[in-house]
Image (cartoon, rainbow, N blue to C red):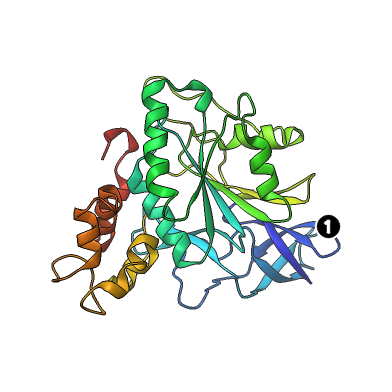
């Protein structure tokens, strides 16, 4: 039998069969995906093959095969640096929720997420949430960030899950697609999902006032079918985003503004640091490339692992 994984708890997987039935499945023994050392070999969104477990008292299944993935979003596991964690697979687009305050989302986090999405050819939309709560300073910060990301090809949408501002735009973009919601804890993923589809009635928690951080309400990734021909994968809030091994010669290709200038560099294998006649460095000096993007590039290139693990409250 075949089906799609809708929910994973790490040991059990809820699989929707082609007939529309849900069955709780597990994997038998060690299940390895070639070339991937992952803390979770099977992810939400995976197409799988399974057998009915005839030894079980209740009707459950045993997953025997994972079909080839169209794509997936993966990050380094924070606790096991040599392991990776596949957040979700077979995604059409990701909505990355960004908040200026309460909690703050920093450009290093945004850039690491975007680089990984570029590497796996997944479209990302930056969603600036909670715009109903912002003063002039925060609104100016949104404009600043949009000036960085829109010119290099990323769609940016300002929304309020509280009063429904521009939620209709999100719904229109989601129609007919499998989308993933991601971002830090507390950026309003669950509230926005409830606004998009009130019948989901997902649980939310308040931001802790002392630390301006969200409390985890989504423990595991889960896919939901929505009433307007859309599927959404809701993911746990993440503090940091560790980029999985990327070749230094290829990293710049996942920064669209770097890639656009690559052919103008003197050397084909230019990594945009100390090489002469580097078009990227020249554009940087001419303020045609954002310094925050270049800083993120250097951090990933140099493997500054602690940066993605740093608590988001530190401002680093």
Q: For the point 63% across and 31% down, which residue is it? A: 203
Q: How far across and how far down the image is residue 275, in percent?
A: 15, 71
Any part of residue 62 in sight: yes
Residue 136 quadrant? top left
Q: Nearer the viewer, residue 49 or 61?
A: 49
Q: As drawn, is 203 to the left or to the right of 32?
A: right
Q: Residue furthest right?
A: 19
Residue where numbered disc 1 is placed? 21
Q: For the point 64% across and 28% down, which residue is it? A: 164
Q: For the point 40% across and 32% down, which residue is it? A: 100
SS state under label 1: loop
Q: As drawn, is 138 to the left or to the right of 59?
A: left
Q: How far across and how far down the image is residue 242, in percent?
A: 36, 55
Number of other residues with Cα within 10 Å of mark 1, as a class: few under 14, some 14 to 19, many 20 or more: few
Q: As drawn, is 178 to the left or to the right of 118?
A: right
Q: Nearer the viewer, residue 171 or 311?
A: 171
Q: Nearer the viewer, residue 65 or 222?
A: 222
Q: How far across and how far down the image is residue 35, in percent?
A: 45, 77
Q: From this view, report whether residue 247 is shown above or below residue 173.
A: below
Q: For the point 25% across and 56% down, which residue is it? A: 299
Q: Nearer the viewer, residue 185 or 259?
A: 259
Residue 177 quadrant? bottom right
């Amino acid at each position: 039998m075949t089906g799609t994984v809708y929910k994973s708890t790490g040991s059990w997987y809820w699989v929707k069969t082609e007939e529309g039935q849900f069955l709780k499945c597990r994997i038998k023994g060690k299940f390895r995906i070639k070339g991937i050392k992952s803390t979770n070999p099977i992810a939400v969104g995976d197409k799988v093959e399974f057998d009915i477990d005839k030894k079980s008292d209740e009707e459950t299944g045993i997953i025997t095969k994972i079909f080839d993935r169209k794509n997936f979003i993966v990050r380094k596991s924070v606790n096991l640096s040599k392991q990776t964690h596949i957040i979700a697979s077979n995604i059409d687009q990701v909505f990355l929720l960004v908040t200026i305050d309460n909690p703050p989302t920093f450009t290093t986090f945004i850039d690491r997420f975007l680089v990984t999405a570029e590497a796996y050819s997944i479209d990302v939309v930056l969603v600036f949430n909670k715009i109903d709560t912002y003063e002039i300073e925060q609104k100016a910060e949104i404009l600043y960030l949009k000036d960085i990301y829109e010119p290099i090809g990323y769609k940016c949408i300002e929304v309020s899950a509280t009063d429904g501002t521009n939620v209709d735009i999100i719904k229109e973009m989601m129609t007919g697609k499998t989308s993933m919601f991601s971002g830090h804890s507390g950026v309003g993923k669950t509230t926005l999902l409830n606004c998009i589809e009130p019948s989901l009635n997902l649980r939310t928690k308040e931001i802790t006032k002392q630390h301006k951080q969200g409390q985890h309400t989504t423990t595991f990734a889960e896919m939901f079918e929505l009433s307007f021909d859309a599927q959404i994968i809701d993911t746990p809030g993440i503090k940091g985003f560790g980029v999985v091994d990327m070749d230094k010669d290829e990293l710049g290709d996942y920064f669209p503004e770097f890639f656009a200038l690559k052919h103008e560099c003197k050397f084909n294998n230019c990594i945009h640091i100390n090489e002469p006649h580097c078009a990227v460095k020249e554009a940087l000096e001419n303020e045609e490339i954002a310094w925050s993007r270049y800083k993120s590039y250097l951090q990933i290139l140099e493997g500054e692992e602690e940066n993605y693990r740093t608590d988001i409250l530190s401002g680093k």
